[in-house]
Image (cartoon, rainbow, N blue to C red):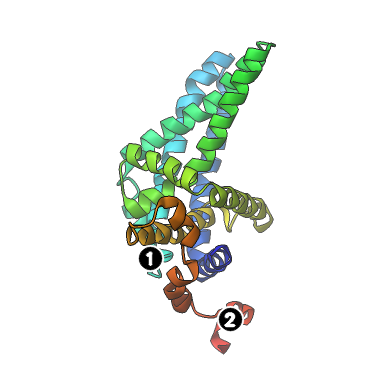
């Protein structure tokens, strides 16, 4: 299944390369505006407290806009990975459809960052065993949170639940698919590391979100199959999941794709 996931994600990305580049540029534009704005605030702020007073709200607003954009991009990526076509205008026309959940996600992300930069150093500065144990506990909480949040956008776009329900499912998916979640995190790191060498045009943000939707779409076959076999315990079902059978239709739809077909599609 992992091999097919990598192949399908590459094919989907290649077939929608221009779409990915366009929305990576839009994402980059928001980040550039955020950087310029924070730099300007840093210049006019006389003290650190004033910078925090002005900079944090501005950063949260820019993060909120990114979350709205990523949610809308993910909605269209869910269509792409399902072998459907998408339109550029759909991303913009539905940009603020889930603005409340994007606001909640922004606050939740802000809390995670606050814990990472304030709480952990505070415990470490205690200089005793209790501080070390508390910092280690918080650190692993953050690790689980980050690994779970990589499922947020695809869950939101494919299951369309509210923020609380989607966040809960993020942790359920992670704990039920810990091994795959770890692999997927490494795969995301690889895509992120590759992006600077391609001037952040690809895969970058849109490519990562597309990969997330591909990963969730394939994992959902597992739960559909388990629902069809209630006679099996969860432990038994996990050992018997017929992945080749479950992804057979996707393999047929995707078809054989040679390297030549990517470079010279008109010759096939």
Which x, y percent locates residue 28?
54, 48
Q: Residues within 10 Å of mark 1 (few under 14, many from 20)?
A: some
Q: Residue at x 42, y 48 (%)?
A: 153
Q: Which residue is mark 1?
A: 86
Residue nearest the observer in this picture, 73 or 34: 73
Q: Quadrant of residue 116?
A: top right
Q: Residue at x 32, y 54 (%)?
A: 93
Q: Residue furthest bottom?
A: 267
Label 2 vs 1, first from the N-terminus: 1
Give the answer, above or below, for where 222 lies relative to 39.
below
Which x, y percent locates residue 62?
46, 36
Residue nearest the observer in this picture, 165 or 114: 165
The quarter of the rendered structure image containing the C terminus is bottom right
Which x, y percent locates residue 193?
66, 51
- Mark pair 2, 1: CA separation: 22 Å
Q: Residues within 10 Å of mark 2 (few under 14, many from 20)?
A: few
Which label number is shown at residue 261?
2
Give the answer, above or below, for where 47 lies relative to 243.
above
């Amino acid at each position: 299944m992992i091999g097919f996931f990598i192949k399908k994600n590459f094919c989907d990305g290649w077939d929608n390369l221009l779409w990915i580049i366009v929305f990576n540029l839009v994402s980059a534009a928001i980040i550039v505006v955020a950087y310029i704005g924070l730099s300007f605030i840093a210049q006019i702020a006389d003290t650190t407290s004033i910078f925090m007073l002005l900079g944090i709200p501005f950063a949260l607003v820019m993060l909120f806009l990114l979350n709205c954009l990523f949610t809308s991009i993910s909605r269209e990526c869910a269509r792409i990975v399902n072998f459907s076509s998408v339109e550029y205008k759909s991303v913009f026309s539905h940009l603020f459809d889930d603005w409340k959940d994007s606001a909640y996600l922004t606050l939740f992300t802000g809390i995670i960052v606050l814990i990472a930069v304030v709480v952990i150093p505070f415990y470490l500065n205690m200089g005793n065993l209790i501080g070390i144990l508390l910092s280690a506990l918080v650190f692993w909480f953050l690790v689980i949170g980050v690994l779970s949040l990589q499922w947020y956008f695809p869950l939101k776009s494919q299951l369309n639940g509210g923020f609380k329900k989607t966040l809960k499912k993020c942790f359920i998916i992670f704990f039920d698919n810990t091994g795959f979640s770890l692999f997927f995190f490494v795969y995301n790191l690889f895509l992120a590391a590759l992006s600077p060498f391609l001037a952040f045009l690809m895969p970058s943000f849109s490519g990562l979100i597309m990969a997330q939707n591909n990963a969730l779409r394939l994992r959902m076959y597992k739960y559909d199959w388990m629902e069809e076999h209630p006679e099996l315990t969860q432990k038994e079902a996990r050992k018997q999941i017929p992945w080749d059978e479950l992804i057979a239709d996707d393999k047929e739809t995707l078809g054989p794709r040679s390297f030549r077909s990517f470079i010279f599609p008109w010759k096939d």
